[in-house]
Image (cartoon, rainbow, N blue to C red):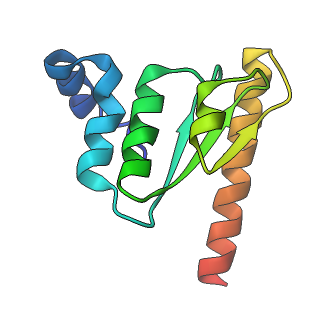
């Protein structure tokens, strides 16, 4: 489930509670203990992603961060952090996309083969 794709929820949450809570609110209602929550932030310091990951940890989820190479808050917060070895935003995002595709492949292979 991608929390950023439901524009109605994102807009309503941002309008009523603030943009920093758009992921925290969804994690609160949709994540269960043992779920895996991946937070993606090029800088690793996006407040809305951090709040979502903090709520996920609070609920007992496994937390994963995708960031760039600079030291950041998400790497200190998550159980696993994939730091793309670059400071160039497009290269970091390409690394995140590639990692996401690899993870999907491995999960599908494990579940359906």
Percent coordinates x, y for residue 25 in the rendering: 25, 38
Q: Which residue lies furthest to the bottom in this view?
A: 113
The residue that appears at 18% across and 16% down in the rendered structure is: 15
Percent coordinates x, y for residue 108 in the rendering: 62, 71
The residue that appears at 38% across and 65% down in the rendered structure is: 33
Q: Is residue 7 visible?
A: yes
Q: Which image quadrant for residue 31?
A: bottom left
Percent coordinates x, y for residue 66 in the rendering: 65, 37
Q: In this view, does 8 lie above or below 61?
A: above
The residue that appears at 59% across and 32% down in the rendered structure is: 74
Is residue 54 or residue 26 the one in the foreground?
Answer: 54
Locate the C terminus by quadrant: bottom right
The mark tally for this picture is 0
Q: Which image quadrant for residue 107?
A: bottom right
Q: In this view, does 46 lie to the left or right of 7?
A: right
Q: In this view, does 28 lie above or below 14?
A: below
The residue that appears at 35% across and 35% down in the rendered structure is: 23
Q: In this view, does 99 lie above or below 87?
A: below
Percent coordinates x, y for residue 69 in the rendering: 79, 25
Is residue 92 or residue 27 the one in the foreground?
Answer: 27
Q: In this view, does 60 lie to the left or right of 113?
A: left
Is residue 51 or residue 92 the one in the foreground?
Answer: 51
Q: Is residue 34 above or below residue 86?
A: below
Q: Which residue lies furthest to the right in this view?
A: 85
Q: Is residue 1 visible?
A: no
Q: Is residue 1 left or right of residue 86?
A: left
């Amino acid at each position: 489930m991608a929390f950023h794709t439901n524009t109605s929820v994102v807009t309503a949450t941002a309008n009523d509670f603030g943009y920093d809570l758009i992921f925290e609110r969804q994690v609160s209602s949709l994540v269960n203990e043992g779920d895996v929550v991946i937070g993606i932030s090029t800088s690793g310091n996006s407040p809305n992603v951090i709040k979502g990951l903090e709520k996920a940890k609070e609920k007992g989820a496994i937390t994963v961060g995708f960031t760039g190479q600079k030291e950041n808050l998400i790497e200190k917060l998550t159980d696993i952090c994939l730091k793309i070895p670059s400071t160039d935003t497009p290269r970091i995002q390409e690394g995140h996309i590639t990692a996401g595709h690899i993870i999907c492949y491995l999960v599908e292979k494990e579940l359906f083969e």
